[in-house]
Image: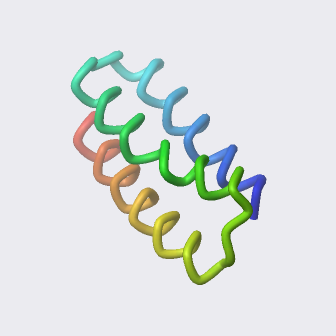
Amino acid sequence: MGLIGTVLPLTLLSVLFLAGNNFTLWIIVLSANTPVLALNLAAQPPKVTIPVMLVSLIIDVVVIATER
């Protein structure tokens, strides 16, 4: 689970950087992915990390869809 918590934000940041570098979307992406990384580093149980990761994934998909 730690790998997806690292790969998901980095993939989205690279998509944002290569697609247009919209600063407003950077703020949304960073604020959505910070809790995912913090919970993974804190080694919280899956019942806590999975909902946060799913919310972050939904936000990431919306950001990617609005960027194009």
Between 51 and 21, the one nearer to me in the picture: 51
In this image, 45 relative to 27: left or right?
right
Residue 65 in the image: above or below residue 57? above
Instruction: Please tell me in which quadrant of the rendered image residue 44 appears.
Output: bottom right
Across and down, in percent, residue 21 comes to 35, 16
Identity of the residue drawn at 55% across and 41% down? 9
Between 59 and 36, the one nearer to me in the picture: 36
Q: Check the image and name the residue furthest to the front.
A: 42
Identity of the residue drawn at 30% across and 43% down? 63
In this image, 35 relative to 23: left or right?
right
Across and down, in percent, residue 16 comes to 42, 27
Residue 50 in the image: above or below residue 68? below
Across and down, in percent, residue 25 comes to 28, 30
Could you tell me which quadrant the C terminus lies in? top left
Residue 52 in the image: above or below residue 67? below
Between 4 and 49, the one nearer to me in the picture: 49
